[in-house]
Amino acid sequence: MPRLIEVRNLRFHYEDGTPALRGVDFHLEAGESVALLGSNGSGKTTFVMHLNGLLSGEGSVEVCGLPVEKTNLPAIRRKIGMVFQDSESQLFMPTVLEDVAFGPLNLGMTREEAASAARAALETVSMAAAIHRAPYHLSAGEKKRVAIAGILAMNPEILVLDEPTTFLDPPGQRALAELLARLPQAKVLVTHDAALARSLCTRAVFFQGGLIAAEGPVEEIVNRFGWDFAGEPSKSAQ
Ligand SMILES: Nc1ncnc2c1ncn2[C@@H]1O[C@H](COP(=O)(O)OP(=O)(O)OP(=O)(O)O)[C@@H](O)[C@H]1O
Ligand SMILES: [Mg+2]
């Protein structure tokens, strides 16, 4: 069986010349969850945007054995679900149910099938009571759950979450961590939160200047880079 994700020597410049990725090698095995740690601007978001073809650099990116290129994008976007940091950007329909059903409808499900997949996904994220509400009236934590439901409704094999706990209060962060721990999918988790990385992932990679500077068990990477509280490396960082 191919690896879920296989990235080799990925390089990417933004149009203004910023070299955001400078030769990234990465893999994700079936059933694995990996934390992407690293300072602001080190390339984590740019990297994950290559996993479903939102950005395209030099090198090779494969998802479930499929090269990430135009002809494969519909199949790849079925296999890999992305939850962005800003849930607002992912919610745009008038009601929660329509929002979550949008992806399944796009995949070719009938209205009934899509609504049923959406209800099941909203059940999973404990938002079934909100189906008729307007997404833009929800709290940050509720929006995040609905955005995750929108992805789960498409039944992906891999979840990519870019800083899912930003904007959430401590109870909201704990509840989200519990929800994510219950989801069976393999995960790529971009986070500054060492506790979240520990609770969900067995392996971590550390981004630095557009490269993966180190990888290993979460605890080892967190200690090595002093990544033990949200946002900033500690004074003991090497
Ligand atoms: N649209 C853009 N145009 C030009 N440069 C960009 C753009 N987006 C990001 N960059 C630059 O690319 C580099 C990597 O940014 P990226 O957003 O991937 O970092 P990150 O690791 O996700 O950071 P953070 O922890 O702050 O989210 C940074 O130097 C950033 O300034
Ligand atoms: Mg980022």
Image (cartoon, grey):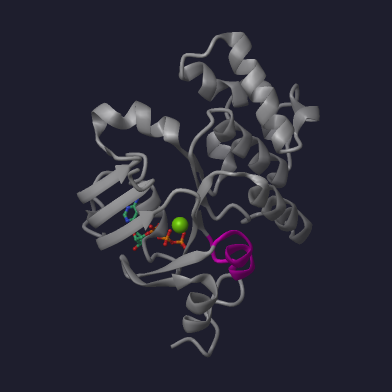
Residue farthest to the left, as pictured? 58
Q: Residue at left 69%, top 26%?
A: 120
Q: Quadrant of residue 148?
A: top right
Lateral position of residue 59 relative to residue 81, left or right: left
Instruction: Name the dominant secondary structure of the magenta segment.
Output: helix
Q: Tell me the quarter of the image containing the C terminus.
A: bottom left
Closer to us: 198 or 127: 198
Q: Residue at left 27%, top 47%?
A: 61
Closer to us: 96 or 73: 73
Q: Is residue 94 visible?
A: no
The image position of residue 192, as x and y in percent, is: 55, 66
166 lies above or below 86: below
Q: Is residue 166 visible?
A: yes
> Disc count in the image?
0
98 lies above or below 181: above
Lateral position of residue 85 relative to residue 76, left or right: right
Residue 198 in magenta? yes
Residue farthest to the right, as pictured? 129
Q: Residue at left 60%, top 37%?
A: 147
Residue 51 in magenta? no
Lateral position of residue 228 relative to residue 133, left or right: left
Quadrant in which ligand 2 is drawn: bottom left
The image position of residue 24, as x and y in percent, is: 28, 61
Lateral position of residue 133 relative to residue 69, left or right: right
Q: Residue at left 40%, top 64%?
A: 41
233 lies above or below 63: below
The image position of residue 186, as x and y in percent, is: 51, 48
**Residue range highlighted in magenta:** 191-201
Closer to us: 178 or 137: 178
Q: Tell me the quarter of the image containing the N terminus.
A: top left
The image position of residue 206, as x and y in percent, is: 41, 70
